[in-house]
Image (tube, rainbow, N blue to C red):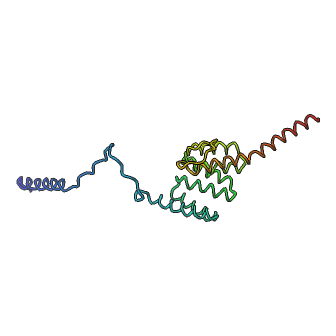
Amino acid sequence: MTSAPQLRTVLLVAALGLLLGACTAPAPTPAPSATETRDRVTASDEPEAQKRARARMELASAYYSRGQMTTALDQVKLAIAADPLYGEAFNLRGLIYSNLGEKTLAEESFKRALQLNARDADTMHNYAWYLCQQQRYGESNAMFNQALAGVGVRARSDQPVRGNQPVRGALSARRLRACALLRAPCQLAARGLQRTDVVARGAD
């Protein structure tokens, strides 16, 4: 049976052990202050999945520029697999499918890119040109104007592009005019058909 002095000794040793443990434990890391300036985000902060996706996109863009659409598509698929929220990858996928004649997949890609980044003027520009090629001129015109508004260039401005205006805005303005020229013959043909129909009805 443990005597009272022995019990007191055991308790004292246990208390000293807890005290020493508290003294040697690392101090808790203070939470960042709400007013503390955040550090600049660098490449080391980028998640590995996003790094892989970006590397795949660089390859896809290179293959696309060389006209190797199937290889570019493979790389875009890998980029999207690594980062399913990578809007730029869906934008490029739309361009690739458009070149491959896959209209439905191209349009779905552009729409998905805009869902992920509704203000991306590059995607608006590419989607607008795609719509123009599909002779959907009204939708194309509206999308081109959104792209131009997104980069701060007025659609009706005939002034040359200044140094502080993005090159994409100038290209969108040129393609908007090109699409209007493509649209004109269709409008003239439609008016001609209407006049022919009126004459035919009069003859009856």
Of residues 119 and 116, the one nearer the viewer is 119
Instruction: Inspect this view and state whether residue 151 appears.
Output: yes
- From the viewer's perspective, tell me whether residue 68 is left or right of residue 36: right
Tally of marks: 0
Tell me which residue sits at (90%, 37%) in the image.
Answer: 199
Tell me which residue sits at (42%, 58%) in the image.
Answer: 43
Return the x and y of residue 147 as percentages of the image width and height: 59, 45
Please, is residue 105 above or below residue 155 in the view? below
* Furthest residue in direction left, as rendered: 5
- From the viewer's perspective, tell me whether residue 192 is left or right of residue 120: right
Return the x and y of residue 36 as percentages of the image width and height: 32, 46
- From the viewer's perspective, tell me whether residue 7 is left or right of residue 153: left
For the N terminus, the image quarter is bottom left
Return the x and y of residue 153 as percentages of the image width and height: 58, 44
Tell me which residue sits at (74%, 46%) in the image.
Answer: 183
For the C terminus, the image quarter is top right
Instruction: Inspect this view and state whether residue 111 appears.
Output: no
* Furthest residue in direction right, as rendered: 204
Tell me which residue sits at (52%, 52%) in the image.
Answer: 85
- From the viewer's perspective, tell me whether residue 116 is left or right of residue 141: left
Of residues 6 and 170, the one nearer the viewer is 170
Please, is residue 40 above or below residue 64 in the view? above
Return the x and y of residue 10 as percentages of the image width and height: 11, 56
Please, is residue 93 above or below residue 186 in the view? below
